[in-house]
Image (spheres, rainbow, N blue to C red):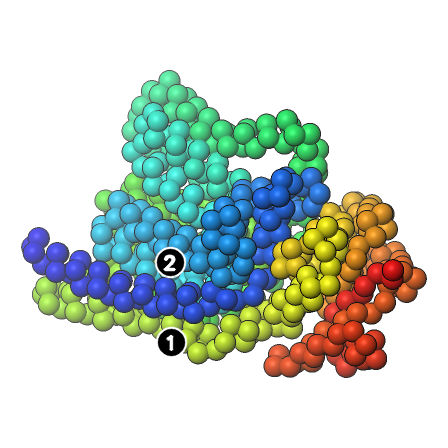
Amino acid sequence: MQNEMNQQKSCLGWIAGVFLGGVVLTRLRLLGLPLERDEGEYAYMAQQWLQGVLPYAETHSMKFPGIYFMYASVLALLGQNPSSIHLSLLFVNLATAFLLYRLGSKWWNSSAGIVAGVSYSILTLSPALQGVWANAEHFVLIFVLAGILLLKGAQGQRLFYSGCLLGCALLIKQHALFFCLFGGVYLGARIITRRESLKNLILNMGVFVAGGATPIMFMALLYWVTGNFSDFWFCTIQYASEYVSMTSPSQGFANFKYNFATILESNFSVLWLSLIGMASVAWKTDVRREYLFLFGFFIFSFLAITPGLYFRPHYFLLWMPAFSLFAGVGFASLPDKFASFRVKTIVPVGILILILGLPIWIQKNAFFTLPAFTVTRQVYGLNPFSASLEVAQYINEHSNKEDQIAILGSEPQILFYAQRKSATRHIYMYPLMEKHVYARSMQAEMIREIEGAQPKFIVEVKLFGSWVSSRPDLEPLLKDWAQAYLSRNYFVSGVVDVLSHEETVYKWGEQARDYSPQSSFHLVIYQRLT
């Protein structure tokens, strides 16, 4: 029997190696993908941090600072370019898959662990989840899974380290709060079901909470000592509280349905295997602890994608480890349905190859043939992520390092590429155009900052996706000011006209001044009059 199990494990190992090899090759092929907005924000603020400027001191963002620290580490070690960022994502993704393998092996068996790890790598490669871009969720999960892995059977120091890792996940993105809550709920339930004393419950919970609070307290102390706590508090707590309360439940349900349907369309086979795993756990009567852990983790993972009810595609990355664990359990339960060892091995392995191969086949063009530029356009439409490289290069070549620039739009990646400081703390227009009490004061602050800084270049982004206004009553203040201010103090130095998914026109200098954009999707680069 042991020999048969070893043969099955060896077979699974080879299959896992082949699929993981394909994932690695795909990510390597797409290393040069242009940065999208969130990546641009993280990279720019990390770049500023490396120059001695703490996040929030001169830039507005509602994310906790852990993601900027992660990006700063990558930029310092690997270089300040998109390929370095996406290479770090490859390492993080493989490490997270390994942690899932360990978690699945601990909670079920090695077969479940192997399938869970491979399923995660395939699911999180999907363009439907924006998985090839280095969003914060990827970095959250490596800390979450490491913390949860330590939590099983943990006592004393291990409990502290488990809490500390989950606290680090929270430092990267606020959504990780639900994983911290899961850790606390699971730990409490484990102690209670073992009928341990109240003293032991309080002691263990205290150690776990102390571990979770340690990185948070360290962060708060850093901002308090440097005199930036009020900026940090406003960005990540006060404004963030407004941000998560703007979407109605009906709109939230529509957001979930639309984005999850897209994910399901290209990854349905793995998700169906997850359902088999759920049914297998639910029907077994001798796996009470596993039932509580797996379904608890699944529910809290879902809760982690709900803040604000936006359900953006990359939010769903936080749910994928739970699906992957159930997929592993689903595969591990298949041999129970067959009698002979040969059938127990061959049939489930054949089913597994089909299940894991289908998402790759469905998305084969994005994975293996389409250029990085085209993959970006397929996922993000006419957003100017590729064009940002050209714009930034022009600004870099026609300005000095001490010159500042401003972006009238939500394209912080231009700041990172150009290696120029923003003339305003507002690197996104979205907060300025949303339904909350701070919007008008933010617009007024941006106007004051730009007028005071007198930036060498101002990039006006005329794309809906760079503004997405939900407050038409606020638009005139900023847009009327911009029109008057630019006409008095700047001249057109460049135009980027996004005509279609395949064609973008670039005009510079005199050609730009004589050019009338043919598309409503365009960027205008203004240079200050001397």
Residue at 53% of width from left, 61% of height from top? Answer: 82
| x and y percentages locating residue 525 in the rendered image | 77, 67
- Rendering coords of residue 25 (x, y %): 37, 68
Q: Are marks 1 and 2 in contact (CB under 8 Å)?
A: no
The numbered dot on residue 120 is 2
SS type, badge 1: helix
Residue 434 left/right relative to 92: right
Quarter occupied by the C terminus:
bottom right
280 and 382: which one is in front? 382
Would residue 132 be seen by someone viewing this image from the given angle?
yes
254 with respect to 193 (left or right): right
Q: Where on the picture, by quarter, is residue 49? A: top right
Q: Which kind of residue does numbered mark 1 sit on?
A: Trp
Which residue is situated farthest in the top direction here?
199
The local crowd at label 1, few if under 14, some if 14 to 19, many if 20 or more residues have their Cα within 10 Å, is few
Residue closest to the eye, 249 or 496: 496
- Residue 272 visible at all: no
Residue 219 falls in image quadrant? top right
Q: Earlier in the sequence, mark 1 or mark 2?
A: 2
Q: Count the numbered circles shown.
A: 2
Q: Which residue is mark 1?
A: 361
- Kindly report the distance in space between the C-alpha atoms of the residues bearing marks 1 and 2: 16 Å
- Secondary structure under tag 2 reads helix
Residue 248 picture quarter? bottom right
The quadrant of the image that shows the N terminus is: bottom left
Instruction: Answer few, some or many: residues within 10 Å of disc 2's Cα (few below 14, many 20 plus, some between 14 and 19).
Output: many
Residue shown at the point (65%, 73%) measured from the top left: 382
Q: Nearer the viewer, residue 90 or 515?
A: 515
Give the residue type at disc 2: Tyr
